Structures are given as C-alpha cells and as structure tokens.
Image: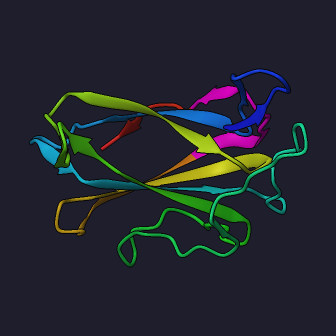
Amino acid sequence: MVASENENTSTLHFDHLSGGLKLTLTNNSGSAITLAGIKVVTRTDVEAAPIAAHNGFTATWAVQGPSVPNDEVGELDGDIVCKYSSEMRFDLQTNGAIGVTLENGNSISFCVPVTVNSVRHLSVTGFNTDGAQLFAKTKDVGTTKSIERNNMYLIPEITL
C-alpha cells in the first residue's frame, strides 16, 4: 500500500499497489508440523513486469528473474520455467513465538501480495524453526492469469 497526503488535512488515504493471492495450506501429512517460514515463488510464461502504476506509484518484489526451484533431486514434476519469476518470504509466529503449528487435518489460509502483472505457476516452500525445508509444492493455475491491483485471486488448496 502507499499513502499520499491530502493537502490541508491531517489524514492519509491508502491505495493498494498490488493484487493478492489467497492461499490455503492443508496438512494431510499424518502428523502435526510447525511452520516457521514460507517462501512463495510466482512464475509466468511472459516477462515479469510491475503492475501498472497507480497515482505515480508502483512496486515489485525484491527478487525478479531466475529462481531455483526448492525440491529434492528427482522430485520435480514436469518442466519448471524459472525465467520469469518473483519470490517473497514470510516468517510465521504464534503469540510472538517463532512458528505456527498445523495439526494433521487442519488448514491455514493467508493472503500474499503479488506485484507482478501475471502468474502461471506458484511454488510454496515451508521451513521449520531450524530453517530446514519441510515441503515444496507447486501449483499450475491453468493459464497465465493477469494480475490487477486491488484484486484478490483464490488459489486452489495446497495439500501437504
């Protein structure tokens, strides 16, 4: 979001600069897992570009360009295009303590800002409190989706 000062007032008006993805992770692993961090990588078939400027402002994620998939050797499904991608990392906490415990059968939903103009594939990698990888899941959203500022896009459930 970005705010601009309105002349002769003491208020700020905030505008969304990004679109968003709503993700739901469901733990069907058979036991509880504690997630301390999640990395989300979006990939597209076209050159990643910022969402169109709004009132003179735009934004992009910190990492643009080639991104190495996180998965075990031999565990990647199909060809993964890494040419046009963006990534963002989230740290998770419960009441100020590192990590969120997700019991078997339970889900967690969260919204991720997306500051590129399109998404085709989405990878979500989870890490434990020691920084070790717990899982890596990739979703193909079917076709390249154009992302517009101030819109939320629902991603089908990701099962762990």
Report the side of 13 relative to 154 (left or right).
right
Q: Which residues are magenta?
A: 140-154
In the image shown, does 73 or 58 lie closer to the viewer?
A: 58
| Residue at 19 percent of width and 43 percent of height | 96
Determine the image quadrant of residue 100. Answer: top left
The residue located at (70%, 23%) in the rendering is 10
Q: Main secondary structure of the magenta part?
A: strand
Q: Is residue 63 above or below residue 4?
A: below
Residue 139 on image: x %, y %: 53, 46
Q: Give the residue displayed 79% in from the left and 60% down from the top.
A: 48
Name the spot of residue 29 as percent of width and height, x first. Answer: 18, 43
| Residue 10 included in the magenta stretch of the image | no
Q: Nearer the viewer, residue 140 or 128?
A: 128
Which quadrant holds the N terminus?
top right
- Disc count in the image? 0
Where's the C terminus, which quadrant?
top left
Q: Is residue 49 above or below residue 83?
A: above
